Image (tube, rainbow, N blue to C red):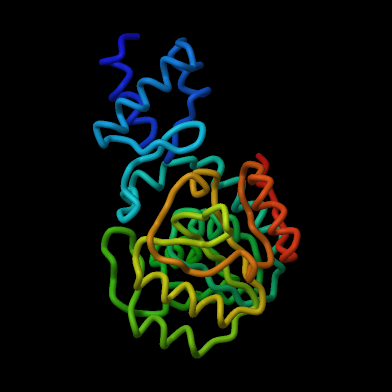
Amino acid sequence: MAKTFRAPEIVEIARREGKVTVEDLAARFGVTLQTIRRDLTELADAGRLERVHGGAILPSSTTNIGYEDRRVLNSQEKVDIARACARELPEDCSVFLNIGTTTEAVAAALLHHRNLMAVTNNMNVAHILAANADCQVILTGGSLRRSDGGLVGGITTDTIGRFKFDYAIIGCSALDEDGDLLDYDIHEVGVSQAIIARARHVFVVADHTKFGRSAPARIGSLASVDILFTDRPVANRLRASCDAWGTRVIYGRA
């Protein structure tokens, strides 16, 4: 395939998957690793991608991928992560699920759990869990973010402060090599921090694309998290940090 045809397809793959790797692209297009490295360098020089070790990511670190794109991005991996998370969540408990397509997958995995109290600032999560007759669903209220059905702002944070949850299930936009949970919306960050502060146990759900991205606002650290659920092995440095912090890492499986 000629370079002029590869370039837009490489950008489209990065948009769908969050990151592209040299080895994967070489296999997809049937060209050498050096050819792909040149393609990525030229795309980076043009501002269409940002080079990272072993590949490239979308250049923006201040704007998230659109919600509809995120819903279909790694959808099976999110289902696997959600099922693994649901297996660790007992019945007869209270749980908070925040904004995100992976937390929505967790909601779907909880449809057969009994005697749950689910509090959420995610209207999509509330709609999903409404199908579970054994689950009491509470919406926090707040300012509606129409792009993804999220509720944010002071009303949301004030409502969270009235509860003490058994479990918090948190999604994030990015997770860096230091173990920091990151997001794009500073208002959503404040809500996530309030959720973590009011939970006895904290679970984070994040597929592998979150490890290759960056975002400007810090939620907190995996050091404060009980379990990280993901779909691929994490980097050795981060795994060593999780071991030191006592943060379990569980991988979703089909």
Q: Is residue 80 above or below residue 98?
A: above
Q: Residue furthest bottom?
A: 162
Residue 36, how many percent across, how many down?
Answer: 42, 19
The residue drawn where x is 38% and y is 61% is 216
Residue 208, how many percent across, how many down?
Answer: 55, 44
> Relative to the observer, which residue lies in front, 197 or 116?
197
The residue drawn where x is 32% and y is 30% is 11
Q: Is residue 50 above or below residue 211?
A: above
Q: Is residue 214 left or right of residue 95?
A: left
Residue 54, how many percent across, how many down?
Answer: 51, 32
> Relative to the observer, which residue lies in front, 95 or 238?
238
Quadrant of the snapshot with the C terminus: top right
> Relative to the observer, which residue lies in front, 151 or 198?
198
The residue drawn where x is 65% and y is 52% is 238
How many badges with numbers are in the image? Answer: 0
Q: Is residue 2 above or below residue 115?
A: above
| Location of residue 156 by image quarter | bottom left
Residue 124, how many percent across, how many down?
Answer: 40, 62
Q: Is residue 14 left or right of residue 24?
A: left
The residue drawn where x is 56% and y is 52% is 177
